[in-house]
Amino acid sequence: MHFVRCLLLALFLVPPVFAAPDLMSQISRKIRDGKRDEAMAMLDKAIVDEPKEAKWLLARGRLNSTMDQPEKAVADFNGVLNIETNNARAFHERGWAHFKLGQFNQSIADFDRFLKILPEQEPQHWQRGIAYYYAREYERGRKQFELHQTVNPHDVENAVWHYLCLARAQGVEKAKASLIPIEGDPRVPMKQIHALFAGKAKPEEVLAAAKDRSDLFYAHLYLGLYYEVRGEKTKAREHIDKAATEFHMNHQMGDVARVHAALFKKGQ
């Protein structure tokens, strides 16, 4: 989503205020420099040295998640919550790790726990909306995306996920009639994607607008979702697979593409 750079999703490289400044800043620097294995070794040692300090487990869980080790990430976040039972960050991060594992109900449960602790964050929480979609909780997903629209009104992706929830629950024509109008999303090819779901553009126009790797990732992801909701599974799988492999991106929407591709492989 457009606000993938929001505070909740940019916490990893920001040392928590309670962290030991020297060591945590060294670890953060290693990660910024691409030396994630060295950062992991430092975190492993910190956990051995201070096993009751939740901050090290939290940091290692985030690093495991970015290294596509969601099972290990879940274990680390479990460890955090054994020490600090109301650690909101751990619930949020574990919720996304569960999503990456295709455990959508567990993901929603963790997001709910996060929002119970920080209810003011509910309008921001588009991740729960996507988890609702994959859990086939389409009405709840629709409501989440409508709520998110109040704080992120220029995001084409939010309008599309709202459309997808409606299309699943009430059909494509109802979804098209209720497509949220969006202006001001500067990203390529979001203008063409919105027009596609509105019935005012063709799939080839989306691809023609995409220029770089990131553009092509989003083009293929949303073309895949567009075809799937219309029952064109072969085309849907082709585009989702491209988003998940050839044009894969290391961020949360990249995770969505990989999860979706895995569901196709399972025949779901």
Image (tube, helix red, strand yellow):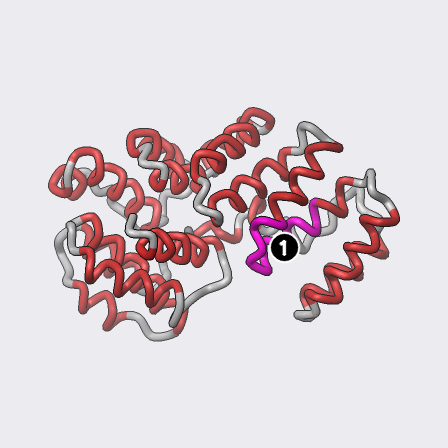
User: Is 156 above or below relative to 113?
Assistant: below
Image point (57%, 44%), residue name: 8
Point 72% across, 32% down: residue:
82
Up the image or down, 36 lies above or below 24; here it is below
Horizontal placement of 182 versus 14: left or right? left
Q: Disc 1 marks which residue?
A: 64
Residue 68 percent across, percent down from the top left: 55, 58
Q: Magenta span covers which residues?
A: 58-72
Q: Is residue 71 magenta?
A: yes
Q: Nearer the viewer, residue 183 or 85?
A: 85
Q: Can you give x and y, in whole percent of width and height, for residue 45 in the image? A: 83, 55
Is 242 on the left-hand or right-hand side of 124?
left
Q: Quadrant of residue 81?
A: top right
Q: Amino acid at mark 1?
A: Asn
> Position of 251 compared to 15: left or right?
left
Residue 184: in magenta span = no
**Residue 57, image x, y percentages:** 73, 45
Q: Residue at x 66, y 49 (%)?
A: 61
Most foreground residue, 174 or 188: 174
The image quadrant of residue 25 is bottom right
